[in-house]
Amino acid sequence: MSSNGTDNNVLLRIENLKKHFPITRGLILQREVGAVKAVDGISFDIVKGETLGLVGESGCGKSTTGRTILRLHDPTDGKVFYRGENLADLPHDRMRRYRRDMQIIFQDPYASLNPRMTVGNIVAEPLEVHGIGNASERRQRVQDLLALVGLNPYFINRYPHEFSGGQRQRIGVARALALEPEFIVCDEPISALDVSIQAQVVNLLQELQTKLGLTYLFIAHDLSMVRHISDRVAVMYLGKIMELAPRDELYNDPLHPYTQALLSAVPIPDPIKERKRQRIILEGDVPSPANPPSGCQFHTRCPLAVEMCKNVVPEWREVSPKHWVYCHLV
């Protein structure tokens, strides 16, 4: 089920990916009494060299999607094809080969760097784990990487607490680049940073993409930042992707009621247009992923829902070239 036109350039193809976390009871027997359906059957492609933005409310499964693609979580079901090889079935020793090509930049630069290690050791750790170079070659590579992300190469003997949040995130980017990956999951890399620093980090990611030919899955809350960096955007709700389209098409002509509601909340920097902006307020709370609604997951909050939405699961279909929607009414 391709969610993109050109097949020959597809770097990653995700088919019906699921990640369910078991809910257990009992101290000794640990009976499984249910599951949190964090990711519940999603399909899309990522084309070589592009940035696919993944947006949605907190707890909708964005980060779990990124981590399951990288096999940081083993998928419950589905396929993840990278260069034609299904990563979901690979034993861990063969998966290790692909770890060099696929990396992640974590959300919190304060929690993702070991406070007891120097910056030099943090950035060099992937090189050591994969046995690349000797000590002096690794040191030179670390200095080159720090310079590449805009930090002083002579900071290698400092510790993370000596840096600001934005500088720490640059250290995280340098670590992700150490093995010369092709694909990087950016897991909300700017949400823990000041607004003034966010643009610097996003601009850095774009420069690196151009220079090194990287492919990104960019996970975020901030719809305006996603519009700035992404080529295509996928909108996620309760473990499902509701809509996927080229960036400008999605922002100018959103088809799914959930996408329309999300975009109606984004302020417009033009005062005349801002006065005319119609907010769509969604009723109720997000249902629990441990017990998602039947039919379309969004029907409990959808202003347009009809009887069919409550009982029949919508089909993931392409309604116009490269524009995919999960909705009966579109």
Image: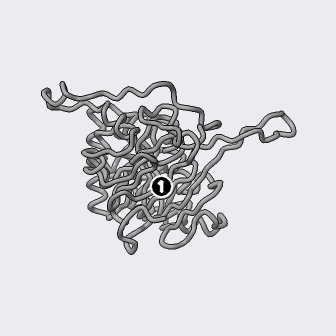
Check the image and report above or below for 285 versus 97.
above
Residue occupying the far right of the picture: 28
In this rendering, would 291 be left or right of 318? right
Q: Is residue 305 placed above or below 96 in the rendered structure?
A: above
The residue lying toward the viewer, choosing from 116 and 241, is 241
Q: Which residue sits at x=29%, y=36%? A: 197
- As helix, strand or loop, the secondary structure at mark 1 comes to strand
Closer to us: 289 or 101: 289
- Amino acid carrying label 1: it is Trp
Q: Position of residue 291 (x, y in %)?
A: 64, 36
Look at the picture and state if 26 lies above or below 242: above
State the count of labels: 1
The quarter of the displayed image where residue 210 is located: bottom left
Q: Report the side of 135 relative to 199 (left or right).
A: right
Q: Which residue is mark 1?
A: 316
Query: Is residue 246 visible from the viewing direction of this image?
Result: yes
Q: Tell me the residue at 40%/59% (across/down).
A: 318
* Residue occupying the point 27% across, 62% down: 211
Residue 181 in picture, x, y percent from top left = 43, 63
Q: How is the image coloured?
A: one colour
Foreground pick, 169 / 78: 78
Q: Position of residue 292 (x, y in %)?
A: 60, 38
Place of residue 143 in the rendered image (x, y in percent of width and height, measured from the top left): 36, 55
Q: Is residue 164 visible?
A: no
246 vs 83, left or right, is left
Q: Is residue 60 above or below residue 273?
A: below
**Label 1: how many residues lie within 10 Å, few (<14), some (14-19) or many (20+)?**
many
Query: Residue, x 26% and y 40% (percent of image)?
Result: 199
